[in-house]
Image (tube, helix red, strand yellow):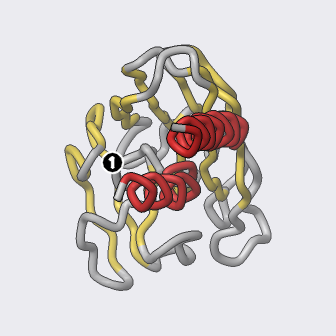
């Protein structure tokens, strides 16, 4: 019975390694009708500072699912969420960004923060673009146990801003490889001791 439980635990490690720690990272938990947008105080898992705009197939499609967020609603705004991590562990943070079509790079910037420290300001020009042109931005961040992940609009406060979607925070693969190897070694040693008895 113990062997079966151990094998089941080992088989579940790869799925744990890929588990997104961000709640509602693709903004799909809140319903927005196709071809519409809405302004909300908060979204599931996210706290809005002022307002956040949720879009479904407006000025382009989402990079993941059907919804995405714009943070320059009536003015530059921001969102954040607290994420549970393991102190001292390294995580891969990624998200998708798109400049808004027909809008200059001065209006499109988004800033990403980890525990209040600026990771980067991302921008691009939407001039001459049709719809969203998504690309993925990635960082390595260290967990403290409880961490604040936030994004804010950073360009001209003119109600035209860049898109944000597919926010993900996962443990770096090396952590899970080491954990898997350690657990397998412990299981093997326990099995050897039992066999010798």
Left or right of 67? Residue 41 is left
Which residue position holds label 1? Answer: 52
Q: Position of residue 57 (x, y in %)?
A: 46, 79
Pointer 1 local density, CA inside 10 Å: few below 14, some 14–19, many at least 20: many
Q: Is residue 33 above or below residue 71?
A: below
Instruction: Return the residue nearer the eye: 68 or 6.
Output: 6
**Residue ID at (33%, 48%):** 52
In the picture as drawn, the residue positioned furthest to the front comes out as 197
**Residue ID at (49%, 35%):** 151
Q: Is residue 172 above or below residue 19?
A: above
Instruction: Return the residue nearer the eye: 176 or 149.
Output: 176
Q: Position of residue 38 (x, y in %)?
A: 27, 64
**Residue ID at (57%, 32%):** 112
- Whether residue 45 is visible to the viewer of this picture, yes or no, is yes
Instruction: Return the residue nearer the eye: 126 or 136.
Output: 136
Instruction: Return the residue nearer the eye: 121 or 29.
Output: 29
**Residue ID at (42%, 62%):** 4
Quarter occupied by the N terminus = bottom left
- Whether residue 164 is visible to the viewer of this picture, yes or no, is no
In the picture as drawn, the residue positioned furthest to the left comes out as 41
């Amino acid at each position: 019975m113990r062997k079966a439980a151990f094998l089941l635990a080992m088989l579940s490690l790869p799925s744990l390694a890929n588990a997104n720690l961000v709640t509602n990272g693709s903004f799909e938990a809140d319903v927005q009708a196709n071809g519409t947008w809405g302004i909300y105080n908060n979204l599931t898992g996210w706290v809005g500072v002022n307002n956040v705009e949720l879009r479904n197939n407006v000025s382009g499609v989402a990079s993941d699912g059907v919804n995405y967020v714009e943070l320059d609603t009536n003015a530059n705004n921001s969102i954040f969420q607290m994420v549970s991590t393991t102190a001292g562990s390294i995580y891969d943070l990624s998200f998708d960004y798109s400049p808004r079509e027909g809008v200059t790079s001065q209006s499109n910037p988004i800033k990403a923060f980890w525990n209040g420290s600026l990771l980067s300001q991302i921008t691009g020009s939407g001039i001459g673009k049709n719809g969203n042109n998504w690309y993925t931005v990635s960082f390595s961040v260290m967990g403290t146990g409880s961490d604040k992940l936030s994004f804010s609009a950073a360009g001209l406060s003119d109600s035209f801003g860049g898109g944000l979607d597919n926010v993900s925070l996962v443990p770096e693969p090396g952590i899970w490889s080491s954990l898997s190897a350690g657990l397998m070694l412990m299981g093997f040693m326990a099995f050897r001791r039992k066999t010798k008895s």
